[in-house]
Image: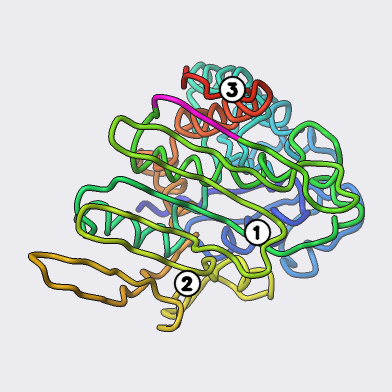
Amino acid sequence: MTSKTVSVGLVGYGMAGRVFHAPVISCVSGLKLTAVVERHGGESVQRYPSIAIVKDVQELFKSPELDLVVVATPNATHFALARDALLAGKHVVVDKPFTITSAQADELIALARQKGKILTVFQNRRWDGDFQTVCTIVRNKRVGRLVEFESCFDRFRPGPKQGAWREQRVPGGGLLYDIAPHLADQALLLFGWPCAVTASIRTQRDNAAVDDKFEIALRYPELDVKLEAGMLARQGRPRFRLSGTLGSFVKYGLDPQEDALRSGLLPTGSLWGKEPEDRWGALDTCINGKDAREKIETLPGRYCEFYENVRDVIVNGAVLAVKPEQARDALRIVELAMESARLGKTVEAIR
C-alpha cells in the first residue's frame, strides 16, 4: 500500500448505507468516509462526526477531492446515479443488484471502460463465512463428485414492512431482486454459467404487494443447483446442502455479520464474523465402507475484504475481486428466472 487515502462519498443512508456501507468503509484503513448524501435529516453525522452531509447528489459528484462514490439507494436509481458518477470521473461501487436490467449493466460497464474508472458491485455475501466454508469443501471435494447444491436464504417476516420501498410494486422491488443476486453470484462463482434456468416466483404473505418467495433451478451437465428464499419460514431450511458421491454437507443459520452490523457493532477485532460451535455445519461421509461425521468449523466472515480490495485496486492497481461483468451475469440469472416463471417452463440460459 502507498500512503494515499481514498476519499469516499456515500449516496444514500437508508438500510444499505447505514447498516453495511458506512460502518465497513469506516473500518478499512486507507478509506475515508468524507461525505454522505442525505436529502432529509442528518442521521449519518451523529455517528460519523467528521463527514459532510450533502443534500444534492450532483454537488457530491462535482467534489474535486472525492475519489470513490458508493451508490446505496433504491434499486431503480442505481443506473442513473452510477452513470452520473462515472461521467463525473469517479470510481463507483453500486449496491446489489447492479441495476434493474442487464442492458443497463452493459451500458455502465462500457462507460466505465471508456472513462478508465473502476466499477464494481457490493456482492458482500461472497465474504459470508458459511459461503467461504462451502468454497473450501467444494474445492477440496470433501463430498466427492458434487451432484446437488442447495442454497436457501429463509427468514420469517409474516407482515410486509410498512413504508419500505422493497415491499412496494416498483422496479427492483420484491425478494427476487433483493436476495437472488447474492445467491446467483455465489453459484456462478463456484460453477460458472449454467445450461438452463427454471424458476417459480410467488407472493405468499397476506397483504403483500410484491414477490416474497422464489425457487430457481440452475442446470449444469452433471450438477443440479437450487437457489431458494422465502419470508414465511419460521423453522428455516439448511442455508447450504451439498450432496455428492462421498456424502453430504449441511449448514444451518445465516452469517452473523448482518445482525452484528444492525446492532451497531463495527467489523473489527479477532472475533468478528466468527460463529459459535453449535452453528457449525456437519459433514457426513461414507468412504471405503466407513461412515464418518465431522463438524466443520465455519470460517470467519469478513465484509471488510470487499472494500480493502476496492482500495487496493484504486491505489495499487490490484485485480478487482467483484468484476462488473460478474455482477451483470448474476442479474441476467434474475432476468432468466423471471422469464421462466412468466412462461411456466425451463428456459435456455442465454447470456
Q: Which residues are magenta?
A: 195-199
> Label 3 vs label 2: CA separation?
32 Å
Task: From the top left corner, tell me how far across and down residue 203 is, in percent.
Answer: 77, 44
Q: Is residue 215 left or right of residue 233?
A: left
The residue at which mark 2 appears reads as: 273
Q: Residue at x 55, y 19 (%)?
A: 106
Q: Which mark, by number, is residue 102?
A: 3
The mark nearer the N terminus, 3 or 2, is 3
The residue positioned farthest toward the front in the image shown: 289
Nearer the observer: mark 3 or 1; the answer is: 3
Q: Which mark, by number, is residue 304?
A: none
User: Looking at the picture, which amino acid does disc 2 mark?
Assistant: Gly
Residue 277's quadrant in the figure?
Answer: bottom left
Pick the front one: 88 or 142? 142
> Label 1 vs label 2: CA separation?
17 Å
Residue 345's quadrant in the figure?
Answer: top right
Q: Is residue 271 left or right of residue 145?
A: right
Residue 270's quadrant in the figure?
Answer: bottom left
> Can residue 67 be seen?
no
> Label 3 vs label 1: CA separation?
27 Å
The residue at which mark 1 appears reads as: 22
> Can residue 254 be seen?
yes
Q: Are marks 1 and 2 in contact (CB under 8 Å)?
A: no
Chief SS of the magenta region: strand
User: Looking at the picture, which amino acid does disc 1 mark?
Assistant: Ala
